[in-house]
Amino acid sequence: MTMTEVFEEHRSLLNGVAYRVLGSANDAEDVVQEAWMRWSGEPRDEVDDPRAYLVTVVSRLAIDRLRRAGSRRESYVGEWLPEPVSDLPDAAEQAELADSVEFALMVVLETLSPLERAVFVLHEAFQLPYAQIARVIDRSESATRQLAKRARDHVRERRPRFETDRAERRRITERFLRACLEGDLDGLKELLADDATLVSDSGGKARAPLRVLHSAHKVGRFLAAVSEERNASRFLRSLGISSMDDLVFGVTEVNGGPAAVVSVGDTPVLLLALDVFEGRVRHVYLLVNPEKMSRLRAPDPS
């Protein structure tokens, strides 16, 4: 096989690793492209295991980029959410890989340090042994195991394992979207956990709360209020939309799970992703930053 063929054989894996570490499909593609440049200049006889070599290069590049991104995200207007994708970066068909890129989990991964995040992704999503991960991050195996334990404990604390099945999550998402569109405050509060939160990401480019909303009452009241005619007009104008007639609403697959997407024609303009636990919505993620919509597919008109 040529060097190009070898790289293309592993590109899907590399995209999957980079996206999970970075939370940005655009940044992930840049990292994989940089890895290709290094790979293409590497003498073939010096690489015994191309897969291990490429995963190491991509992981290190992603860690470095994530560290640099820290200062930019600190100055970001409002809350920062990952860039959602309709098509998984590694075309994952296995349930375990799809779960590892689910949007609510990606949000939790944002709270890990770059090294913790890389170790968690490589071990939990891709089942790499600790000895190999230790070589990737240039740490001892015992230090790597400690990083993994901290990351697992952190994720477990913020994301319990007892998740609602996908069919039920889709039904809840559909009911939630319908209640939002109808301004049904009682219906929203029925679906929301008492301590529910809403995190919105506009990047300062649209009207949305800049701080996290806490409690079912506050979250439900905000979402119900948006549907009121005057508020809806203001909200839509902030997205550059002049008429409700141009909108398409629907529930579609995003990051391997159901999410509500609103589009103008074929252009998505809003994502509403829910974190569901024991039949109730714990967290609502509202994304309206147009710079993060390029990897979403518009819902089918209903």
Image (cartoon, helix red, strand yellow):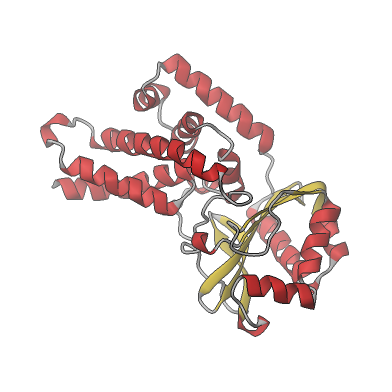
Which residue lies at the image location 71% right of the left edge and 56% below the top edge? Answer: 209
Residue at 45% from the left image edge and 33% from the top image edge: 118
Residue 220 drawn above or below residue 300 = above
Q: Is residue 136 visible?
A: yes
Would you say 302 lies left or right of 292 here? right
Residue at the spot x=50%, y=39% of the render? 70
- Is 63 or 235 nearer to us in this picture? 235
Residue 89 at least partly seen: no
**Horizontal side, residue 84 vs residue 180: left or right:** left
Relative to 86, say whether 138 is above or below. above
Placement of 157 over or under 175, stated as above or below: above
Please provide percent x and percent y for residue 195.
81, 45
Q: Residue at x 13, y 36 (%)?
A: 44
**Which quadrant holds residue 246?**
bottom right
Q: Judge by depth and name the residue closer to the eye, 84 or 199.
A: 199
Residue 52, above or below 196: above
Residue 280 relative to residue 249: left or right: right
Residue 117 vs residue 302, the one in the foreground: 117
